[in-house]
Image (cartoon, rainbow, N blue to C red):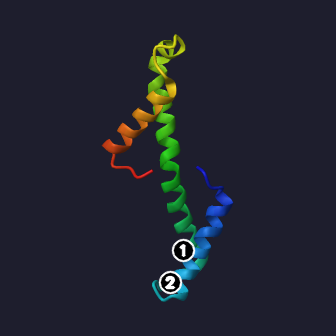
Amino acid sequence: MRLSKGFVKHLSRLTVEALRKKGLIELSADPAATAGAVEKAMIDDLSVEDRLNAEVRGILKAYEAEIERGRLDYHTLFSKTKQKLARERNLVL
């Protein structure tokens, strides 16, 4: 995740407050609880790429020997595999 969890927490509070002030949302719950739910959703969304990267690394372990011999380029394989999985899963990165 490229953003720190502290920054995401701050951003979620600012987002909820801005939406509330503009009248775009009405809160029936505590603003802090709403900001917490927004924070969780943001972190989940931001973590998608991290999980995808870990999965791609796992897939490429099967080709480790050929990569080490120089027959395959790790960065190219990583990028292409990641793009393919993201496209198949309709992920926006």
Which residue shows up at 47% across the image and 86% down it?
A: 26
Residue nearest the viewer, comparing 24 with 28: 24
User: Can you say whether 49 is above or below 44 in the image?
Assistant: above
Residue at the spot of label 1: 34
Q: Residue furthest right?
A: 6
| Disc 2 from disc 1: Cα separation | 8 Å
Q: Residue furthest left?
A: 88
Q: Position of residue 40 (x, y in %)?
A: 54, 61
Helix, strand or loop under label 1 = helix
Residue 48 bears which disc, if any? none
Q: Quadrant of residue 35?
A: bottom right
Q: Residues within 10 Å of mark 2 (few under 14, many from 20)?
A: few
Q: Position of residue 59 (x, y in %)?
A: 44, 27
Residue nearest the viewer, comparing 12 with 71: 71
Q: Amino acid at mark 1?
A: Thr
Which residue shows up at 51% across the image and 88% down it?
A: 22
User: Can you say whether 8 is above or below 82 in the image?
Assistant: below
Q: Position of residue 8 (x, y in %)?
A: 61, 62
User: Can you say whether 82 is above or below 61 in the image?
Assistant: below
Which residue shows up at 33% across the image and 49% down it?
A: 90
Residue at the spot of label 2: 27
Residue nearest the viewer, comparing 3 with 33: 3
Q: Amino acid at mark 2?
A: Leu
Q: Quadrant of residue 62?
A: top left
Helix, strand or loop under label 2 = loop
Q: Residues within 10 Å of mark 1 (few under 14, many from 20)?
A: some
Would you say the residues marked 2 and 1 are in contact, meaning their CB atoms lie under 8 Å apart? yes
Which residue shows up at 38% across the image and 50% down it?
A: 91
Give the mark nearest the N terminus, 2 or 1. 2
The number of discs equals 2
Q: Position of residue 49 (x, y in %)?
A: 49, 46
